């Protein structure tokens, strides 16, 4: 049987994992794919570095574009990363040649998916990216194939293991964000430049892809993105007391209550999720994706969202699909849908958690509640803890209110002399209907 | 675009769900499949019954084989059920014609998968059965495609919603099996003849399919199957106290510890699973499938395992795959692997839970523990509750012992005059390594 010949750019953890997996499981993979799958050409910045696997016999190229131009390969695998530069150049070069592409590059697909999906369709060159969302979890296959028959109402979940690890550590140890982040960086669980993870951008890229598969591709610039820097250990204590878990969620919903038909709600932000929701139990570096379908109902899949083994498993699953002759259009549809802007959240209603740090003196509660009343924010529940530094922490849970009302109230509250520090607003997201 | 024309046998809940889903989501399904999917021919026992959907314009056939012989269809969909009879006749007739088949029939695939997979391969006629395992959860796609690159160590889970509902109700209400079963029957959650569900056969059919995809097809007759009839409300109380949940599991494992290479362990039985395992939180009629892969690590997917909507979603996802031209061989391999017998459990080691109902008198514990010692069963933990009827319930948790030792001990204990009723042995299954 003629092997499927792979040209691979990027020999970091995932690239080496792909080579190792293809060799270790060669017999099974050949039986499943119907033919052998072999890496024949590579490129990486350093040719001489010892990567722990035998790279002899592979054709070395000077750059990724040169790999994509190699006439002796059947598939280009891009594992360089970054939405622009050599990663994009390689993918475009390969697709233009009509060569199938497999990538783990979430930023590339999230930001340039529109152009790349048209190119893929024009040249009849499949572009597969299972590893771009939730690592080893076949989230893309789940949404684009497994739930292809259904009309999804929402899709999303815990898409960044670094943030979930930090929030889990903060909760179990009672320590604050900066301290846990520093430790995570020392252990290699967080990057030296942590913004992509902790400010929500990595989650945003993955969510944009999931929303594109479930509903319509999104204008990425219209996606509201907030990270986890403002969460305190005190918020995690309040959450537990109130029966919630705090999770950084990326979520997209079609036709949210009260919005015009065709509206796509999408956002990335830390939320309070009910402790009984399947996603609330997903801890540490694990990821999870939940869907709610009109026919299929609620579904949740959890597993390892990153790392050499899981990501390599997803990349090679795409290669097996290609070898089997299975290739789904980028957005799962024969047409290439035009992107849409995410809904303005101001008018959408939700319950919210509002945490205020206040001076502890008579009449505070009356001042606060009158501001909430003036902003039409109806209060469901209030809890108070003494602060270690004097003063008090207040947790307020609201009834359903338009998002603009809670933000107006928070701004007004921040201006009160009794309120110290910046109020924190978290959406309460009842994933399970 | 030429529609994909469906001939459908069986107009029960699922059959009607398929027709309803194809109509309600016609626009999206056409975009995703690349062509319309339309039911054109049907058969069912009763032609005149009002099923709540418009069936005018469909060709009616006298029987399922006649549907499979209809030259105006592109795919035969079998939703009759039963491993033999018209269901099998229809599937064989269609495959022999070279016609693709979609079925939700777990018994048919579990018992006759060997013969049907050879026929499917010989005639180049795909046989898809996503709906046969875990309803709306794309468990087959997960294992056969999403994890195709990986070497799985184990696969299994909660595969029968009726049993999980009964165990959940028993735990939350403190009532015993017979009472909860009767209520479930009255509510329509359990069949009048409940044996297929509560004795584990439905789970066994689904597990045999999953094991066939992950490892090798099994000789179904060699699969050890036990149901949930022996579980008491007292066992569920002990489980909670010990930090476990009792779940009816179907599980298969490749190369279990200490067994010769190539061994497939597989069984269906109620187990104690750690309360922190993702599967322990899966309650009521929900199903869940967990996998453990050498590269992908642990993964769990949960959702609705039965019902009109979820099952129809899975059937139509298969139809979309066919319309897209994607068809995977039955066992996910180009070759048709020969079936193997499940490992003899006698020599495999595990920790066990042993529940004894005993007379409450001096020296009982000494009698019991000497029997355990004589059978080389090493005890980790003992707990005792007074029984409402006098006497006591004892829960014993063992260290790792060969399964034959715990059964020998249970038999010896049952013969003691102080032991009233039949001892219960449950495997303690640490799904999460």
Image: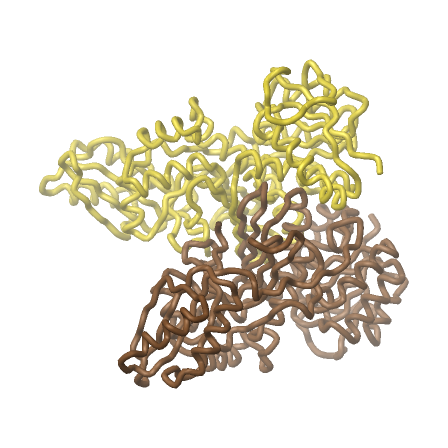
Chain colours: A yellow, B brown
On the picture, is A396 further left or further right than B67?
Answer: left
Q: Is residue A154 visible?
A: no
**Which residue shows up at 32% across the image and 75% down it?**
B365
* Residue A222: x %, y % from top left: 51, 31
Residue located at (42% from left, 35% from top): A163
Most extreme residue toward the top is A62
Position of B38 compared to B24: left or right? right
Q: Is residue B97 above or below residue A152?
A: below
Q: Please indicate whether residue A337 sits to the left or right of residue A275 in the image.
A: right
Residue that appears at 71% across and 78% down: B49
Seen in the picture, residue A170 relative to B2 is either above or below; the reply is: above
Q: Residue at x 41, y 49 (%)?
A: A280
Quadrant hosting residue B62: bottom right
In this picture, is B346 found above or below B420? above
B37 or B198: nearer the viewer: B198
To which quarter of the image does residue A82 belong? Answer: top right
Which residue is situated farthest in the left direction here?
Answer: A362
Please state the horizontal and vertical placement of residue B147, each as a whole percent of the image: 64, 46
Image location (x, y in percent) of residue B417? 39, 86
* Figure label count: 0
Q: Is residue A365 visible?
A: yes
Image coordinates for residue B238, horizontal then vertical, percent: 36, 69
Q: Nearer the viewer, residue A188 or B386?
A: B386
């Amino acid at each position: 049987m003629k092997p499927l010949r792979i040209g691979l750019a990027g020999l970091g953890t995932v690239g080496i994992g792909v080579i190792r997996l293809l060799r270790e499981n060669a017999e099974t993979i050949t039986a499943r794919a119907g033919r052998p799958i072999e890496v024949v050409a590579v490129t990486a910045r350093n040719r001489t570095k010892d990567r722990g696997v035998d790279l002899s016999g592979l054709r070395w190229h000077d750059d990724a574009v040169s790999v994509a131009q190699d006439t002796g390969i059947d598939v280009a695998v891009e594992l360089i990363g970054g939405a622009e530069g050599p990663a994009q150049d390689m993918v475009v070069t390969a697709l233009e040649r009509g060569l199938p592409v497999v990538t783990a590059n979430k930023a590339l697909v999230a930001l340039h998916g529109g152009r790349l999906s048209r190119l893929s369709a024009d040249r009849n060159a499949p572009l597969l990216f299972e590893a771009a969302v939730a690592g080893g979890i076949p989230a893309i296959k789940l949404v684009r194939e497994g739930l292809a028959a259904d009309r999804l109402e929402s899709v999303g979940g815990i898409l960044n293991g670094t943030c979930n690890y930090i929030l889990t550590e903060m909760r179990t140890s009672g320590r604050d964000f900066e301290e846990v982040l520093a430790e995570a960086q020392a252990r290699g669980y967080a990057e030296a430049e942590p913004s992509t993870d902790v400010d929500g951008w990595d989650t945003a890229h993955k969510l944009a892809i999931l929303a594109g598969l479930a509903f319509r591709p999104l204008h990425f610039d219209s996606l509201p993105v907030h990270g986890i820097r403002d969460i305190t250990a005190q918020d995690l204590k309040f959450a537990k007391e109130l029966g919630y878990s705090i999770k950084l969620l990326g979520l997209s919903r079609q036709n949210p209550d009260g919005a015009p038909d065709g509206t796509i709600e999408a956002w990335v932000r830390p939320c309070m999720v009910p402790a009984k929701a399947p996603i609330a139990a997903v801890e540490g570096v694990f990821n999870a994706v939940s869907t709610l379908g009109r026919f299929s109902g609620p579904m949740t899949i959890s597993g390892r969202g990153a790392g050499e083994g899981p990501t390599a498993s997803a990349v090679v699953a795409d290669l097996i699909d290609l070898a089997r002759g299975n290739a789904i259009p980028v957005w799962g549809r024969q047409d290439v849908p035009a992107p849409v802007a995410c809904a303005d959240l101001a008018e959408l209603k939700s319950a919210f958690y509002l945490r205020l740090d206040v001076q502890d003196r008579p009449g505070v509660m009356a001042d606060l509640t009158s501001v909430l009343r003036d902003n039409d924010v109806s209060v469901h529940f209030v809890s108070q803890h003494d602060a270690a530094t004097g003063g008090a922490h207040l947790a307020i849970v609201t009834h359903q209110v338009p998002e603009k009302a809670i933000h107006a109230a928070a701004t007004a509250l921040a201006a009160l002399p009794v309120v110290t520090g910046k109020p924190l607003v978290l959406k309460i997201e009842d994933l399970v209907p």
